[in-house]
Amino acid sequence: MESIKFKISIDLAKKILGNIENAKNYILELKKEKNVPGLKFKTISRGPRKGVNVLSNSSQELWKIIVNTWDYEISKKIIRKLFKQTEKYRNGKDADSAMKVLLEEWRALGLGEIGWPFSQGKFDDFVQRINSESVNGGIKDEKVKAAAVKYRRIKEINTLRNDFIETLIFEKSEDILPTLSHSKGLDFFINGIPFDQKVAKSPTGEFKKDFQEDWRNKAIENPNIVAQYLYQYQDEGRFDANPRLLVVYIDEDISIERIKEIIDSINLSEPIQISFVYDHEKFGRKKYTTICFVILLHI
């Protein structure tokens, strides 16, 4: 768990800033705060920006400058400022009104309870079940069409909710440093430590099976056990034991207002530590220890 409070690598700088344009904007903001040696400028001689001074360093030089001049407190302030200019942040701030529109459309289409019509990545299994029913082909077609519409719309709702959640987390503390683009395995630095935000639609099927009809209460009362299950039963192709910020839907039909209430009440200063055993196909069973935060979304 590499902290960025004292130093940063070029790889991490790229994960945080995302692209060279963000890097240039960051450096220009940094220049307002402190001396930044090694910068080169050129004046644009043509076009609508004629006479404007722009950075002329190579990309490689700029990334090195960012690493060599890294100052956690100043850098955090600048990156938070840049994050507020992103579309993700704007979407999160507008989520309340946008969600009302999506929910009104859902009800107008008569889609019933908000929920997944089939598991993500299990469309083939869903169609197989429909095909096995003793009804005519037209009815089967309508069922598949309705499920596809429902699936698309709940994905849209969840994307909006996830942007809203990320915005709420960002605004909880000045010591949260977000990444400016979707970087695999990294969404936030909390107190200098990297965390990957993972959103789960349930505490896992294994959790529900083990705790049966009491699974919901068990999950709400034991976020550490929920985290253990999510790590233990993750897909091997995307396995890691890195720190995560786990957002878990206990109830799918949860309002924006309730989500805000839950996130306002959580503590993001002290992560929980968990141990879990993972059964690797090639390496067998192996024990891991990690830290995480768990946000349980329930009515």
Image: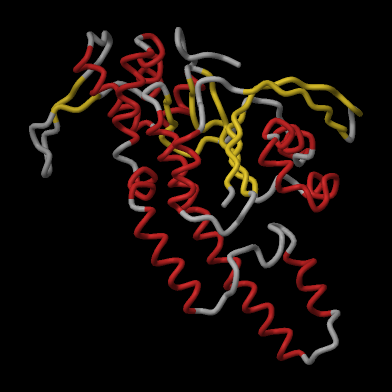
Residue 221 sits above or below residue 63 on the image: below
Residue 68 shown left or right of residue 125 in the figure: left
Q: Residue 87 location in percent, x, y?
A: 35, 46
State the residue at coordinates (49%, 74%): 107
State the residue at coordinates (51%, 27%): 267
State the residue at coordinates (71%, 64%): 118
Towards the viewer: 198 or 137: 198
Residue 127 sits above or below residue 178 on the image: below
Residue 246 location, quadrant: top right
Residue 138 location, quadrant: bottom right
State the residue at coordinates (19%, 17%): 32
Residue 239 location, quadrant: top right
Type of colouring:
secondary structure
Towards the viewer: 233 or 257: 257
Residue 89 shown left or right of residue 270 in the figure: left
Q: Residue 189 location in percent, x, y?
A: 48, 24
Q: Quadrant of the N terminus?
A: top right
Q: How many marks?
A: 0
Name the residue at the left extreme: 51
Towards the viewer: 195 or 228: 228
Residue 29 shown left or right of residue 216 in the figure: left
Towards the viewer: 287 or 295: 295
Q: Residue 144 location in percent, x, y?
A: 68, 77
Q: Residue 207 location in percent, x, y?
A: 79, 44
